[in-house]
Image (cartoon, rainbow, N blue to C red):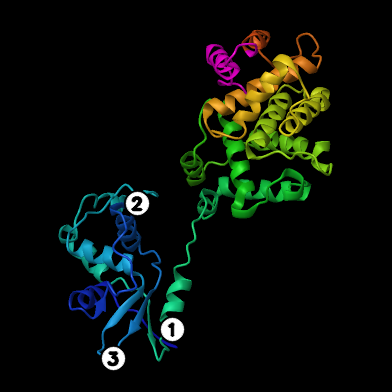
Amino acid sequence: MKFTTSDPDISTIYNRIDDGTYDLQPEFQRGEVWTKNKKQRLIDSILRGWHVPPIHLVAKEDNTYDVLDGQQRLTAIRDFVLNKFTIDGKIEPIDPAITELNDFGYEQLPPARKRSFNQFPIRVFALTDYTPDEPHELFFRLNQPTSLTEAEKRNAFVGGPRNQVRGLVAWAVNEGLAADRIGFSNARMAYDDLIARFLLTLEKRSLTEKVTAQRITNRYRSTEVFPDETVNQAKQSIKFVLSLPLLNRSGSRKPNKATIHTWLCMAAKLHRHDLLGSYGSGLADVIELVEQSRVKSDLTTGRARAVLTVFNDRATSRVADVSSVVLRDLTAWMLFSDRVPLSTGATPLPEEIGRAWKRAGQVNADRGLYEFAMAVDWGEFPWL
């Protein structure tokens, strides 16, 4: 199999689509599946002069070509030139020159803009001298499904917040953040996602604002770095969690992403009140109890067991919901206050926590504790 390389401009590519030289619908291709939004993003990339992935064609004896890879891109270009959709001038990052073209169709483009669009080159590889099975194999390899995680997508934002997260991940790995200790690896940048969410939670100082993937992406897009105080608080909390004895004990239940976020937030709260040194060992004991209760249900009885059940339920389902984040924090602090003697005036917890235990005795402890959390604004700013 050989490749012939060329760089035709969009005007040439459109004409070849229009006259049938490029067949967008050979029998092995899927239908047109790109949404309008995806098409607009491709046109936006072209208007910005950004790189567009190359097109792969299969040359035929009649001097026509089947489109092997790039069908959706070529379809988007064709549809734009045919005025089937308009420009979205509000795509991030905002470019004032493109914002001025918002809702413009191809025919409405100013002459200079239209020429620039038409002259935009796209690399084309044409397959020649191939055996019957080679195009199919290449098609398969080019189109193997690869779905990027949100953390992997965010990693393309080269800037302050992203660099801080990457730096913290590297530091944490050096401190002992590893799959054999915490129960999950950094495959698909899971550690980056964990630390980014934690930093955003610390910055907001609240558990009641849902940290969505879009919010993290918007923070990465910003040029404003996380404050030194936030990064230091995160480091101290991560260091504490990585020092937990249960992480080094063979056969111990390891934290999952949901529970480790809760432990980080609890450590951060104690650190903010200068209590992590005094009560860190007590928190470590509570964490061990909670983590082991996920596999041994007989570690507690009565209301404490009901509290642990709520925590464990919220650590395995609906884990990212605000209600789950709040309830994990509330139940963990209830166990902490019940098992760790606190000096008078030293507690960073609301005095109302004693009332929460009364809700734990209800038939539906989950509902009772959540109603209590909402009534006392548990986790509201400035919680952390």
| Residue that badge 2 annotates | 95
Question: What percent of the width, then of the height, locates residue 123?
Answer: 37, 76
Residue 21 drawn at (x, y percent): 23, 81
Q: Is residue 191 magenta?
A: no
User: In the image, which is nearer the foreground, mark 3 or mark 2?
Assistant: 3
What distance separates the C-alpha of mark 3 from that of mark 2? 45 Å
Residue at image mark 3? 61
Q: Quadrant of the C terminus?
A: top right
Query: Which residue appears at 32% of the width and 69% of the height?
Result: 71
Residue 327 x, y percent position in the rendering: 60, 23
Question: Which mark sits nearer the N-terminus, 3 or 2?
Answer: 3
Residue 341 vs 155, above or below: the answer is: above
Residue 369 position (above or below residue 286):
above
Residue 133 is marked as 1
Q: Nearer the viewer, mark 1 or mark 3?
A: 1
Residue 198, placed above or below residue 277? below
